[in-house]
Amino acid sequence: MSGAAPAIGLAGFGRLARDYYLPALRALGAVDRLAVADPAPAARAEARARVPSAALYEDPREMLEAHRPDGLLVASPPSTHLALWRAAAARGIPVFMEKPFLLPHELDAIDPHDPAWARLMLDFNRRFWPPYRWLRDAVLSGRVGRVLRARLTLCVDVRPWSRASDHRSLPAEGGALHDLGSQLLDLAATLLGAAPTRLRAAHADPAEARGRARIDLVFPSGASAALELGYTERTQECVWIEGERGRLYLDDPNYLPHRERRGARAVQRPLDWAALGWRGAFRSRSMLRYTVRAALAAFLSALRDGRGFEPGFDDALRVARWLAAAERSLASGAEQVLA
């Protein structure tokens, strides 16, 4: 790839693409050669209004053939991911894909040893958030001693996200387990610096139609992590990690991460409010906007330099396998041993 701005193809023009991908691409100087594909006429009209110079297509495969982008961004529903990835791989086009990577019944279609599949980066955007990186570094440097247990929560009000597309409510698209579980499983492994060895999943409330779930993980060190996820009326995201010598916590991703020594009690809320106010005043520094831009910057940089992507294919595949294990556990009620 030359030093010119890359030609980018964007499959799907829902809220994520409109309000997060597009501003990030503008900031990164990557909209001059943009093409957008979306089967919905209203979405294509919105793309035309926001980026008059963009080439528009109804079929993403037609876009790949006619536009020949240097990279493809996939922000379409999960059921489209495998076909789009195959179409891009057949043309040698690297892919930046929104999670989840694949749905469980599609895993048998993957050859993990085929190099043509390897040009993939998954949008595990929370890896790029400085407060989460601070927590990871604190764990790995032993600042709270050996980790005993952790709790991660990601509950999202998806109503604002469903105005352009209601695919999250469709069982065939994987639901909250695959949408939010992808992020939580990757984040748990990233923060604790290891892959889990055992997993058990359960519905938080079997009578709740919107789909809340809990995933319990066990790590090689003996540490455990409880992941709570779901589509709820109130968005909540937080992390709590207890070690032998204290604990780490982040009560909201737009707050500050904190460490408390065992037996001490710190009052951190004014600092959190100050951080939240600063991020509110500079919205580009809020968690989702910042991390989407940082993840896309990493993808474009690797694309330009011909480097491998991180998080890449191996990361995407292992989380897809863990989600498949969670599906089996939900169906059977039994703990699953992870390879």
Image (spheres, helix red, strand yellow):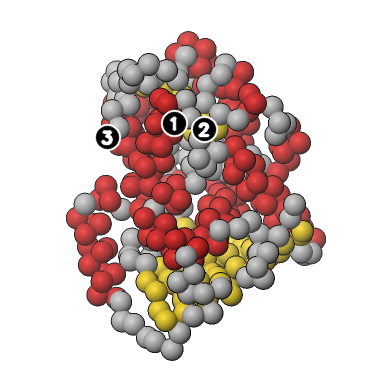
Pointer 1 residue: 302
* Secondary structure at numbered mark 3: helix
**x, y (%) of residue 322?**
67, 52
- Whether tag 1 and tag 2 are in contact, CB under 8 A, the answer is yes
Q: Amino acid at mark 1?
A: Ala
> How far is mark 1 from mark 3, CA to CA?
17 Å
Pointer 3 residue: 27
Q: Earlier in the sequence, mark 2 or mark 3?
A: 3
Between 49 and 84, the residue placed more toward the observer is 84
Number of other residues with Cα within 10 Å of mark 3, as a class: few under 14, some 14 to 19, many 20 or more: few
Q: Residue visible at 44% across and 52% down?
A: 126
> How far is mark 2 from mark 3, CA to CA?
23 Å
267 in relation to 24, above or below: below
Q: Amino acid at mark 2?
A: Gly
* Secondary structure at numbered mark 1: helix
Q: Is residue 40 left or right of residue 313?
A: left
- Whether tag 2 and tag 3 are in contact, CB under 8 A, the answer is no
262 in relation to 131, above or below: below
Residue pushed farthest top?
A: 66
Q: Nearer the viewer, mark 1 or mark 3?
A: 1
- Residue 233 in sight here: no
Between 227 and 338, the residue placed more toward the observer is 338
Pointer 2 residue: 308
- Whether tag 1 and tag 3 are in contact, CB under 8 A, the answer is no
Q: Examine the image and state in which quarter residue 254 appears.
A: bottom left
Number of other residues with Cα within 10 Å of mark 1, as a class: few under 14, some 14 to 19, many 20 or more: some
Q: Amino acid at mark 3?
A: Ala
Q: Is residue 57 left or right of residue 316?
A: left
